[in-house]
Amino acid sequence: MESWTIKHFSQSNPAGTGQDDVPALLRRVADSIESLGLVKVQDLVMHMEITAGGDWPSLTVYFHDAED
């Protein structure tokens, strides 16, 4: 059986006011993806944590180098 490893990172807005701002989170994640250079995004998974301060979404980005 063939296998391979994929890189990933998770990101959320800072805790507190605005932590539930999904458009802001998407912009932050887009900036982070661009800073990686040439990569191919394989998958995006959104998670929602319920905290005392309200909803706190995060995104996990799965990617690999464009050369792979």
Image (spheres, rainbow, N blue to C red):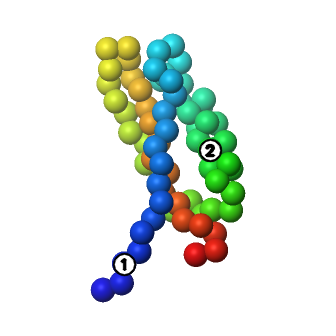
**64 is higher (above) or lower (below) than 45:** below
Disc on the earlier residue, 1 or 2:
1
Question: Mark 2 falls on what kind of element?
Answer: helix
**Place of residue 66 in the rendered image (x, y in percent of width and height, measured from the top left):** 63, 69
The residue singled out by tag 1 in the image is 3
Mark pair 1, 2: CA separation: 27 Å
Extreme-bottom residue of the structure: 1
For image coordinates 48% across by 48% down, the residue present is 9
Give the amino acid at mark 1: Ser
Give the amino acid at mark 2: Ser
Question: Mark 1 falls on what kind of element?
Answer: loop
Q: Quadrant of the C terminus?
A: bottom right
Q: Is residue 18 left or right of residue 2?
A: right
For image coordinates 43% across by 32% down, the residue present is 57
**56 is higher (above) or lower (below) than 41:** above
**Place of residue 23 in the rendered image (x, y in percent of width and height, measured from the top left):** 59, 31
Res. 32 mark? 2
For image coordinates 34% across by 30% down, the residue present is 49
**Place of residue 55 in the rendered image (x, y in percent of width and height, measured from the top left):** 39, 23
**8 is higher (above) or lower (below) than 19:** below
Task: Sort mark 2 into few (<14), some (14-19) or many (20+) by Cα contacts within 10 Å.
Answer: some
